[in-house]
Image: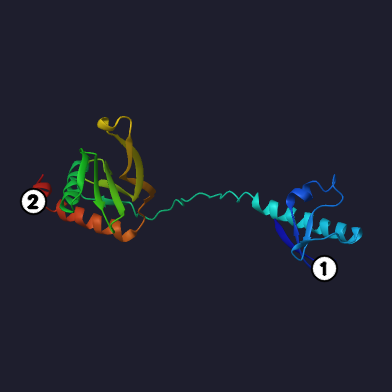
């Protein structure tokens, strides 16, 4: 039911949608004026009814409006900024070994390690219901003919998780009482990923590359 002010009738008018839909079939729709049923003059009633139909149509159109679809353009702008790569005066195998040691020193779990690639991950929990996981992948390639200069590429991806709680209903049957069952609720919790992004902070990669250089200067890697 919609309450619409009709200036022709000098007061609020309650118009019932069912009556409006049947306006073409029912020339005298039910209109409540001042809280009681009334039958105003036919011309005024028709003008007020037309206003009410227009108002209801606008309200229905607003309810059925579909939100616009978000369109995102390219998020990448390729440039010459060396955020994710550095040159090292070492072979690719030594660079990747230094990267593996750098990750281990910071508490990362190594998923895989070879002479050309290292991958490790680490978990963080900023609050009771949030969880972060950082996955770092290092790729080492030669950058000189003699193989003594390498280029290290590093990419770090941070996944965000949140704790979701769900209630599961179950029943307990009691044999001694026949078919009587006692319902009870059991809760469960699960971590659900809600976002993922590549870390793009220059300071993050600068600190990692500095740590790799420190391990490259270790005696066993520097002497080989």
Residue 63 horizontal side relative to residue 21, left or right:
left
- Residue for point 26% across, 30% down: 175
Between 101 and 8, the one lying in front of the other is 8
Cβ atoms at labels 1 and 2 below 8 Å apart: no
Query: From where the camera sits, is residue 91 visible?
Result: no
Q: State the scheme by which the image is colored.
A: rainbow
Which residue bears the numbered disc 2? 219
Which numbered disc, 1 or 2, marks the residue that appears first in the sequence? 1
- Quarter of the image with the N terminus is bottom right
Query: From where the camera sits, is residue 220 visible?
Result: yes
Name the mark nearer the viewer: 1 or 2. 1
Instruction: Determine which quarter of the picture holds residue 5.
Output: bottom right
Residue 135 horizontal side relative to residue 224, left or right:
right
Q: Position of residue 170 (x, y in %)?
A: 33, 38
Residue 47 horizontal side relative to residue 147, left or right:
right
Between 175 and 194, the one lying in front of the other is 175
- Residue for point 77% across, 62% down: 36
Between 57 and 183, the one lying in front of the other is 183
Which residue bears the numbered disc 1? 7
Label 2 crowding class (10 Å Cα cut-off): few <14, some 14-19, many 20+? few
Label 1 crowding class (10 Å Cα cut-off): few <14, some 14-19, many 20+? few
Q: Position of residue 94 (x, y in %)?
A: 17, 44
Q: Position of residue 78 (x, y in %)?
A: 44, 50
Q: Is residue 200 above or below residue 100?
A: below
Q: Is residue 47 above or below residue 182?
A: below
How far is disc 1 from disc 2 in space, using C-alphas? 93 Å
User: Of helix, strand and loop, which one carries label 2?
Assistant: helix
User: Of helix, strand and loop, which one carries label 1?
Assistant: loop
Residue projecting furthest to the bottom: 10
Q: Position of residue 95 (x, y in %)?
A: 20, 46
């Amino acid at each position: 039911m919609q309450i619409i002010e009709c200036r022709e009738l000098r007061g609020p008018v309650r118009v019932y949608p069912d009556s409006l839909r049947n306006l073409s079939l029912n020339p005298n729709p039910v209109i409540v004026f001042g809280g009681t049923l009334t039958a105003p003059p036919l011309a005024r009633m028709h003008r007020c009814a037309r206003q009410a139909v227009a108002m209801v149509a606008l309200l229905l159109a607003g309810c059925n409006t579909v939100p616009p679809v978000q369109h995102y353009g390219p998020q990448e702008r390729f440039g010459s900024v060396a955020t994710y790569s550095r040159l090292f005066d070492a072979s690719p195998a030594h660079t990747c070994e230094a990267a593996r040691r750098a990750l281990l020193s910071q508490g990362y779990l190594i998923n895989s390690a070879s002479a050309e690639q290292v991958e490790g991950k680490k978990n963080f929990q900023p609050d009771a219901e949030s969880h972060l996981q950082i996955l770092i992948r290092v790729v080492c390639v030669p950058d000189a003919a003699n193989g003594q200069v390498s280029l290290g590429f590093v990419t770090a991806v941070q996944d965000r998780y949140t704790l979701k709680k769900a209630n599961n209903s179950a029943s307990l049957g009691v044999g001694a009482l026949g078919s009587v069952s006692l319902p009870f609720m059991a809760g469960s919790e699960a971590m659900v990923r809600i976002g993922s992004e590549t870390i793009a902070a220059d300071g993050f990669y600068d600190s990692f590359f500095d740590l790799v250089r420190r391990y490259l200067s270790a005696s066993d890697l520097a002497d080989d």
